[in-house]
Image: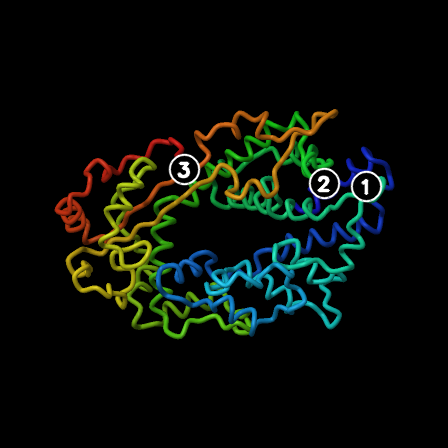
C-alpha cells in the first residue's frame, strides 16, 4: 500500500513539475525507504498487541523505563536528535511503549554498515520517530523539485502515519475482510489515483499531501469507515470483554518482563504467551480463555455519562479499569479500601476518533489547481465537531455476580439511567 501511494504520487509529481523533479536515483531511494518504514513501523508490538501494553497502565509494569532502555538498549547514541531526549526527564522516567521498541528492533536488524536492504536503518527510524535524526546521506538526497529546494521527509512520514496513510488503508480492508463486516470498505482506487504532492502553502521548503477535488467524498467515506470500524468492531463489547480477560491472565504470569536489550523479547509470540497462560496453574483467568467464558456485560456508559461515571468510580478504583483488577493490588489507605465491599467490576474506556488526535502534524490539503486549500476549509465532515470524537465505556462483572453487581451499584447511588443496556446514541462529544 505504501508503494502504491508513493508510485501514483511520484508519477504525478514528475508530470506536474517536470521529469527531473524526482530523479531516478531519488525515486528508487525514497521508494525503498518508505516501503521499509511501512513494513517495520509496528515491530515493537508484542504478543496480543495493545493488550500487553495495557498491563503497565493497570499496575503491572513489564516494560523497562525509557531511561534504562536508552542506556542499555540497542539504539545507537548518534541516532538521537540533539533536542530529542536531552531535557525530557519526565518522559524518560516513564515506561517505554511499542514505538520505542520498534526503533530498537530496527537498530538490531541493521548489518555491519548500519543498513537494512541497502537503506540506513537510522533513516528508516527517522521516518517513524521525531527523536531520531536523519543521516547526512538522507539530507543530501532530500532535495527534490525543479530547483531541488523541497524536502520529501514530511511526505514519507505522512504516508506511513498520517490522515491518509498506508497503515489505515491496509488494516481497514484486511480487518473488514477477515471479520466479515462491511464497515471498513472504501474506494481504494479513487484515493490512490488522486493523492498528489504539492508545495506546502505554510512551509515553502516542504511538500505536503493533497487530494484532487473529485476524491474528496472518497476520503470522507474512508474516515467514516474507520470511525464505524472502531464503534462496531474494535470497541465491540465482546472484543473488549476478552481483552480484559486476557490482560488479567497476563497479569498473573510470574517473571514477565521485557529486558532493555530486547533479545529475549524478540522471541515472544502469541502462541508462546498463550501457552504460558494455559500452563500456569495459579492463573484462574486461563480457564476463561480455554473454555471461552466471557465476562457479563452490564451496560455501556454513553458519552454524556462519562463525567458522572468517572466521578463515581474515583473512590473505588484500585488501578485504571477496575475495582479489583489484580488480586495483589489493594489501596494503601485502609479507610478507602473498598475492594472487599464491592463485587469485581471491570470497565474499559473506548474512544473512536473520526480523524487522528494529532491531526495537525500532517494536515491534508485539496489541490484546486491554482491554489492549495486545507481540507478542513472545504470538507463539511472535518468542519463539524459533531462526530469528531466518540467516547463510551463498557462495564463488566463475572457472569455469576450480575445480581450482586447491580445491587451494589444501586446501593452506592449509581444513576440507574446509565445502567441501561441499550446502545448509546451516536452523539459526538
Q: Nearer the viewer, residue 136 or 249?
A: 136
The residue indicated by pointer 3 is 390
**Cα separation between marks 2 and 3:** 32 Å
The residue indicated by pointer 1 is 145
Which tag, 2 or 3, sits closer to the chain's start? 2
Q: Secondary structure at mark 1?
A: loop
Against 357, is 78 above or below? below
Residue ID at (82%, 38%)? 14
Q: Secondary structure at mark 2?
A: strand
Which tag, 1 or 2, sits closer to the chain's start? 1
Say the numbered circle drawn on residue 207: 2
Q: Secondary structure at mark 3?
A: strand
Coordinates of residue 213 in the picture (x, y in percent):
66, 26
Residue ID at (26%, 55%)? 317
Coordinates of residue 400 in the picture (x, y in percent):
19, 54
Residue ID at (38%, 40%)? 391
Residue ID at (69%, 32%)? 194
Residue 224 left/right relative to 256: right
Neighbours of disc 2 within 10 Å: few (<14), some (14-19), many (20+): many
Amino acid at each position: 500500500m505504501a508503494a502504491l501511494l508513493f508510485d501514483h504520487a511520484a508519477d504525478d509529481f514528475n508530470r506536474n513539475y517536470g521529469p527531473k523533479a524526482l530523479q531516478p536515483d531519488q525515486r528508487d531511494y525514497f521508494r525503498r525507504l518508505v516501503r521499509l518504514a511501512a513494513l517495520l513501523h509496528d515491530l515493537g508490538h508484542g504478543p496480543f498487541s495493545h493488550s500487553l501494553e495495557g498491563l503497565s497502565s493497570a499496575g503491572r509494569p513489564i516494560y523497562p523505563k525509557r531511561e534504562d532502555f536508552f542506556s542499555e538498549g540497542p539504539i545507537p547514541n548518534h541516532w538521537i536528535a540533539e533536542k530529542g531526549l536531552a531535557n525530557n526527564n519526565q518522559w524518560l522516567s516513564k515506561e517505554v511503549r511499542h514505538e520505542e521498541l520498534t526503533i530498537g528492533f530496527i537498530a538490531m536488524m541493521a548489518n555491519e554498515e548500519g543498513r537494512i536492504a541497502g537503506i540506513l536503518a537510522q533513516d528508516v527510524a527517522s521516518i517513524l520517530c521525531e527523536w531520531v535524526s536523519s543521516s547526512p546521506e538522507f539530507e543530501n538526497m532530500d532535495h527534490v523539485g525543479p530547483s531541488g529546494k523541497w524536502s520529501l521527509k514530511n511526505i514519507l512520514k505522512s504516508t506511513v502515519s498520517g490522515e491518509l496513510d498506508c497503515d489505515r488503508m491496509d488494516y481497514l480492508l484486511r480487518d473488514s475482510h477477515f471479520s466479515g463486516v462491511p464497515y471498513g470498505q472504501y474506494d481504494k482506487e479513487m484515493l490512490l489515483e488522486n493523492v498528489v504532492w504539492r508545495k506546502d502553502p505554510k512551509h515553502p521548503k516542504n511538500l505536503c499531501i493533497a487530494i484532487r477535488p473529485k476524491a474528496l467524498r472518497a476520503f470522507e467515506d474512508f474516515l467514516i469507515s474507520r470511525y464505524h470500524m472502531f464503534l462496531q468492531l474494535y470497541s465491540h463489547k465482546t472484543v473488549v470483554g476478552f481483552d480484559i480477560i486476557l490482560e488479567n491472565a497476563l497479569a498473573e504470569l510470574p517473571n514477565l518482563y521485557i529486558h532493555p536489550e530486547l533479545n529475549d523479547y524478540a522471541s515472544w509470540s502469541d502462541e508462546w504467551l498463550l501457552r504460558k497462560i494455559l500452563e500456569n496453574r495459579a492463573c484462574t483467568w486461563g480457564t476463561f480463555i480455554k473454555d471461552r467464558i466471557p465476562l457479563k456485560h452490564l451496560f455501556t456508559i454513553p458519552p454524556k455519562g462519562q463525567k458522572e461515571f468517572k466521578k463515581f468510580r474515583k473512590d473505588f478504583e484500585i488501578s485504571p479499569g477496575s475495582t479489583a483488577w489484580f488480586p495483589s493490588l489493594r489501596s494503601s489507605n485502609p479507610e478507602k479500601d473498598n475492594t472487599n465491599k464491592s463485587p469485581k467490576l471491570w470497565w474499559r474506556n473506548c474512544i473512536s476518533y473520526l480523524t487522528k488526535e494529532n491531526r495537525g502534524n500532517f494536515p491534508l490539503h485539496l489541490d484546486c489547481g491554482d491554489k492549495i486549500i486545507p481540507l478542513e476549509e472545504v470538507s463539511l465532515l472535518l468542519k463539524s465537531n459533531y462526530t469528531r470524537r466518540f467516547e463510551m465505556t463498557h462495564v463488566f462483572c463475572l457472569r455469576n455476580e450480575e445480581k450482586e453487581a447491580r445491587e451494589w451499584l444501586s446501593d452506592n447511588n449509581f444513576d440507574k439511567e446509565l445502567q441501561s443496556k441499550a446502545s448509546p446514541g451516536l452523539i459526538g462529544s
